[in-house]
Amino acid sequence: MLNLFKGAIGMFKNPTSHRAVKYEDPAVASDAVLLADLLLRLLDGVEARPAA
């Protein structure tokens, strides 16, 4: 799971923070949004760790 999030951040978040991104293909843009939605839903399902 950690690698999935690290890869998604490395692929989509970091490059777009440092340059303008223009998706030429609407399907690719849609897939990026759907991936972000999936990752957020996975986070919603994670239980908070008890304080150490």
Image (tube, grey):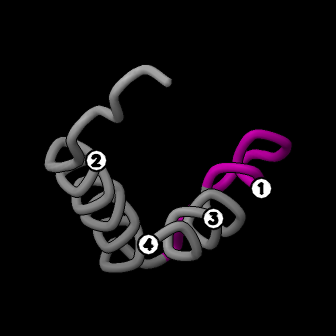
Crowding at mark 2 (Cα within 10 Å: few <14, some 14-19, many 20+): few
Check residue 6 in the rendering and tell me which mark sits there, or answer none.
Answer: 3
Q: Tell me the residue at 28%/32% (across/down).
A: 48
Q: What whole-number distance in Å separates the C-alpha atoms at marks 3 and 2?
A: 13 Å
Q: Which residues are magenta?
A: 13-24
Sequence-first disc among 3 and 2: 3
- Work out whether residue 1 or residue 15 is closer to the camera in this orientation and state it: 1
Q: Tell me the residue at 77%/56% (across/down).
A: 15
Sequence-first disc among 4 and 3: 4
Q: Tell me the residue at 23%/47% (across/down).
A: 46
Q: Position of residue 20 (x, y in %)?
A: 74, 46
Label 4, on which residue? Answer: 1
Badge 1 marks a residue whose secondary structure is helix
Sequence-first disc among 1 and 4: 4
Residue 12 lies within the magenta run: no
Sequence-first disc among 2 and 4: 4
Amino acid type for the residue under numbered disc 3? Lys
Which one is in front in this view, the residue at disc 1 or the one at disc 4? 4
Q: What whole-number distance in Å separates the C-alpha atoms at marks 2 and 1?
A: 22 Å
Badge 3 marks a residue whose secondary structure is helix
Badge 2 marks a residue whose secondary structure is helix
Classify residue 18 by image quadrant: top right
Q: What whole-number distance in Å separates the C-alpha atoms at marks 4 and 3?
A: 9 Å
Badge 4 marks a residue whose secondary structure is loop
Contact flag, marks 3 and 2 (Cβ < 8 Å):
no
Contact flag, marks 2 and 1 (Cβ < 8 Å):
no
Q: Is residue 45 left or right of residue 1?
A: left
Q: What residue occupies the far right of the structure in this picture?
A: 18
Q: Position of residue 14 (x, y in %)?
A: 75, 50
Label 2, on which residue? Answer: 43
Q: What residue occupies the far top of the structure in this picture?
A: 51
Label 1, on which residue? Answer: 15
